[in-house]
Every structure is written in C-alpha cells, then in structure tokens.
Amino acid sequence: MRRHGVDVLLAGSIRDDGPLPEVVTDTIAAQRLMREKIRGVTFCLMIATTLHSIAVGNLLPAWVQVVCVDINPSTVIKLADRGSFQTAAW
C-alpha cells in the first residue's frame, strides 16, 4: 500500500482474527518484506506500539538512530538492550 509517497506494510500475527485484505499474514514473508523496506533507513520513529517497535528494532542495524515515543519505559529499555545504541527516550 502506498499513500502520499510513504510505503506501508501491514504484517499480521497468529493472533489476528480476520485481518484486512492487504495484511501479510505469512510471518516469514512479512519479515522478508520488512527487511526490504528498511534498506537505506537512517532514522526510525517508533510511536506507542511496543511489539511493533521491538520487531522493527530487531531488523535495524544498531547504528540507525531510533526515537521511541511510548508511555511504557520498558519499550525504550528493550530497544536499547538489543543493541540500538542510538535509541532515545522522549
């Protein structure tokens, strides 16, 4: 899906109950697509979604600058612990 020049990838999980038609429900295929879409990313803004932030953080090289905005401080801690040394809490 592409809107306003921004690529969007909707990846489902085994817990999804009737996902939208454009959701990639095959987790291996979704991970492959996510890896393709993050190529060349130098900055990542993660907003209020712990599971998605951690999933994307695990795919990013450690040198990518990450800003995480979340009410739960453990999200930032988990991102920093996994090696995202550029993670900043806001």
Image (tube, rainbow, N blue to C red):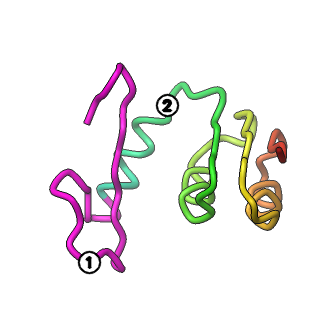
Magenta stretch prevailing secondary structure: loop
| Disc 1: which residue | 17
Work out which quarter of the rendered image holds the N terminus and state it. top left
Residue 21, quarter of the rendered image = bottom left
Residue 73 vertical position relative to residue 89 in the rendered view, above or below: below
Please tell me whether residue 25 belongs to the stretch shown in magenta: yes
**In the image, which residues are magenta?**
1-28
Residue positioned 35% across, 20% down in the render? 5
Q: Where does the image place residue 43, in percent across and percent down from the top left?
A: 66, 29
Residue positioned 35% across, 21% down in the render? 4
Tell me the SS state at disc 2.
Answer: loop
Number of residues whose C-alpha sits closer than 10 Å to that of mark 2, classed few (under 14), some (14–19) or many (20 or more):
few
Residue 15, quarter of the rendered image = bottom left
Work out which quarter of the rendered image holds the C terminus and state it. top right
Among numbered discs 2 and 1, the one appearing first in the sequence: 1
Residue 36 vertical position relative to residue 11 in the rendered view, above or below: above
Please tell me whether residue 54 belongs to the stretch shown in magenta: no
Q: Where does the image place residue 16, in percent across and percent down from the top left?
A: 31, 74
Gap between marks 2 and 1 measured at Cα: 30 Å
The label nearer to you, 2 versus 1, is 1
Tell whether label 1 touches label 2 (CB within 8 Å). no
| Disc 2: which residue | 39
Tell me the SS state at disc 1.
Answer: loop
Please state if 80 lies on the left or on the right of 25 as rendered: right
Residue type at mark 2: give it. Arg
Residue 42 vertical position relative to residue 16 in the rendered view, above or below: above
